Image (cartoon, grey):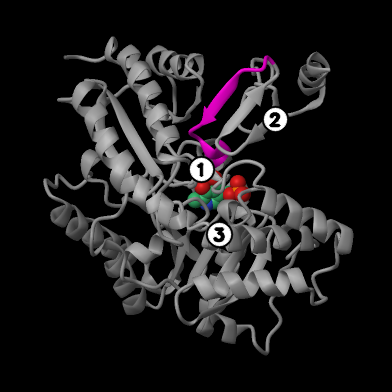
Amino acid sequence: MTNRTYELDRAHVFHSWVAQASMNPMVIESAEGSYVVDDQGQRYLDFSSQLVFTNIGHQHPRVVKAIQDQAARLCTIAPQHANAARSEAAALVAELAPEGMDRVFFTNGGADAVEHAVRMARLHTGRRKVLSRYRSYHGGTQTAVNLTGDPRRWPNDYGADGVVHFFGPFLYRTEFHATTEAEECERALTHLEHTIQMEGPDTIAAIILETIPGTAGIMPPPPGYLEGVRALCDRYGIVWIADEVMAGFGRTGTWFALDLYDATPDLITFAKGVTSGYVPLGGVIISEPIYETFADRPYPGGLTYSGHPLACAAAVATIETMKDERIVENAATLGETVFAPGLAELAERHPCVGEVRGVGAFWALDLVADRETREPLAPYGGTSPAMNEIVAACKKHGLLPFVNYHRLHVVPALNITADEARAGLAVLDEALSVGDAHAAR
Ligand SMILES: Cc1ncc(COP(=O)(O)O)c(C=O)c1O
C-alpha cells in the first residue's frame, strides 16, 4: 500500500517549489500530537509544525470532532449566505484582534489574504505601489510572491507588480552599520522614510510587513520599530498591512505577534494556525476606515469558498481549544523556561551557531561557518553539505526540523510538553555537533 502511495506520488503529484524529478517525499502514515509516523513505522518529533501551522498539534480530537459534526450538518454553502460556523469564527477572530478591527474577510489561505489586503489598500487609497522588506515571505500567488523579499520571488518577478523593497531591522546582519538595537531601529526607520520620499508618498498604497518575519529568519523587530512604521504610515497616508499568517494564533506566546508591540495596523492577514491547518482557511481583518470605503461601494473581489463552513468550524474549535487548554500561555512559558535558556546553551557550546532569535514557540538558529565573519553555513537561497548533514542527523535521531537555507527553526506545536521540547533540543545538540565540523573554531 505504502509503495503504491509513493509510486503514485512520483508518477502524478507535482510538488511545490522543487525540481520534480529529484524529489523524494517522506510518506506519512499517521500523526498525533507532536509526532508523525512514516511508512517504515519511524516516529518523528515534529519540530516544524509542518509548515508552521499545526499550532495545536496533530489530530486534536476536539477539532476533528468539530469538523465531523459540521460535515454531518452542512458541508458547504456559498459565501453570500450567512452561516453559523462562519459568523462564530468571524466573531472569535474579531474579538482577538486589536480594538476597532471588527470585520473579517475569509480566504482559503495566506497568499490570497495578502492579495485581498493589497487590493483593499489600493482601492482605499487610490494609490498603487506597495512597499515590503527584503527577508520576508508573503505567499506564492502573483502579488504575494512579488511582495516576498526572498529568493522565491526572483524567478517570478517581472517588475510589473508595483512593489518596492526596502531593508528592515536585523541587527545580526545589519545593513545600517548599527551596533545596538536602538541604532538599528532608528536607522531602519530613516531608511524607510527615505524610501517613501524617493518613491513618492502619493504613489504608495501600503507597507506590508510580517510582524515578526518567519521563514525569512524569525527577526523580532526592535522596540519602537513598528510604532515608527505606524507613524510613517500616518504621516504619508499609507495603509499598514501586518502579515500574521505565520506569527499569529499563538506562535509568539500571544494571540497575535502584534500584541508584543504598541502599534495597530490597518489590515491584518492571517491563516495557518487559525485552524491549525486542519482545513485551509485564511483571512483579512479590516479596520473601520477601510470597512467604510466598502460600506456603500461594492468590494470588487471574492472567492467561491470564502468562509467555508468546514474551515470555519475548524477555526471555532481551534480557537476555543486554545483558550480552554491555555495553549497560547503554554507557548509563552515554553519560550521563557525551555527554549530561551536551552537554545542559549546550545549556542554557547556549538561554534556553528551564530545567533539565536525568537519568542514563544518561534525560534531561529542562525548557523554560520565562522562566528567572526558571520558567513552563513549555506549561501543565501541555497543549501550546503553542512546543512544537509545537520538535517540528516536530526531525522536519524527522530526529529523533523524546519530548515531554511542556513537556518534551523524551532517551531513545534504550541502545546508540546516541556519534556518533549527538551528531548527535541537534545537531538539538536547532536545534530549541531555535525555542523561544528564545518565551522571555524
Ligand atoms: C508570513 C506569510 N504570509 C503568507 C504566507 C502564504 O500563505 P499560504 O501558503 O497559506 O498561501 C505564508 C506561508 O508560509 C507566510 O509565512
Mark-to-mark CA distance, 3 and 1: 17 Å
SS under mark 3? strand
Q: Amino acid at mark 1?
A: Ala
Q: Quadrant of residue 372?
A: top left
Task: Report if the CB atoms under discs 3 and 1 are less than 8 Å apart.
Answer: no
Mark-to-mark CA distance, 2 and 1: 16 Å
Residue 42 belongs to magenta span: yes
Nearest the camera: 28 or 145? 28
Question: Within 10 Å of the Cα at label 2, are there few (<14), some (14-19), or many (20+) other Cα atoms?
Answer: some
Residue lying farthest to the left in this orientation: 179
- Where is mark 3, residue-wise? 270
Please tell me which residue is depicted at 29% across the width and 69% down the height of the picture.
Answer: 227
Q: Position of residue 67 (x, y in %)?
A: 76, 55
Mark closer to the observer (3, 2) = 2
Labels 2 and 1: the sequence-earlier one: 2
Look at the image and give the residue range highlighted in magenta: 40-51
Nearest the camera: 441 or 395? 395
- Where is mark 1, residue-wise? 413
Q: Position of residue 200 (x, y in %)?
A: 37, 68
Mark-to-mark CA distance, 3 and 2: 27 Å
Q: Amino acid at mark 3?
A: Phe
Question: Within 10 Å of the Cα at label 1, are there few (<14), some (14-19), or many (20+) other Cα atoms?
Answer: many
